[in-house]
Image (cartoon, rainbow, N blue to C red):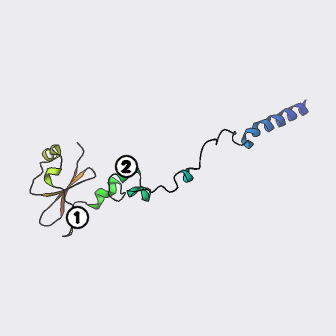
Amino acid sequence: MMNKFLILGGAALAFATTPALAGPPSHAKAGKANHAQMHKGHKMKGHAMKACPPGLAKKHNGCMPPGQAKKMYEQGYRFDRTFSGYTAYDRIPRDLRRHYDLDPRDRYIYDNNYIYRVDPTTRIVREVLNAIL
């Protein structure tokens, strides 16, 4: 009786390990080319060359996540004299101008869903506003 259990156990073990040793079926790779060969010669443009995710690539800020971009211009940050990336007052959406009571005499940078209020004489960031309503 013990021999029957040993033989049945050995047979069950042999059948259980058979799928692990099997290769893929013949139709598994049929008609599929190597992905790298398919795209060989295609030139990638812009931020995609740096392997930047699509959501960050369209922000055109050097593939920087929004949280890091916000930290870049914190309150008290001073722009140098040559900085020319200010956003014209009328280019900021009207509902944001009304909501935050923006003064047309101040300078603003509208980027990555933030509005940076910059003092026009000292070029220091006075306020960072979240531009999502």
Identify the residue shown where x is 18% and y is 49%.
Answer: 92
Q: Measure the C-alpha gap from mark 2 to mark 1.
A: 26 Å
Query: Residue type at mark 1?
Result: Tyr
Residue 45 image-quadrant placement: bottom left
Identify the residue shown where x is 24% and y is 52%: 114
Residue 118 quadrant: bottom left
Q: Quadrant of residue 7?
A: top right
* Image-based side of 54 in relation to 75, left or right: right
Residue under label 2: 55
The quadrant of the image that shows the C terminus is top left
The circle drawn on residue 63 is none
In this view, the residue in front, 79 or 24, is 24
Quarter of the image with the N terminus is top right
Label 2 element class: helix
The x and y percentages for residue 9 are 82, 35
**What residue is rendered at 8% in x and 57% in y?**
105
How far from the left and from the top, in percent, is residue 22?
73, 41
Q: In the displayed structure, would residue 48 be above or below residue 7? A: below
Image: 29 above or below 82: above
Secondary-structure class at tag 1: loop
Q: Nearer the viewer, residue 57 or 2?
A: 57
Q: Which residue is under mark 1? A: 77
Image x and y of residue 37, in percent: 56, 53
The vertical placement of 28 against 129, above or below, is: above
Asked if disc 2 and disc 1 are in contact, CB closer than 8 Å, the reply is no
Q: Amino acid at mark 2?
A: Gly
In front here: 20 or 30?
30
- Closer to the chain start, of discs 2 and 1, is 2
Crowdedness near tag 1: few (<14), some (14–19) or many (≥20) residues, C-alpha within 10 Å:
some
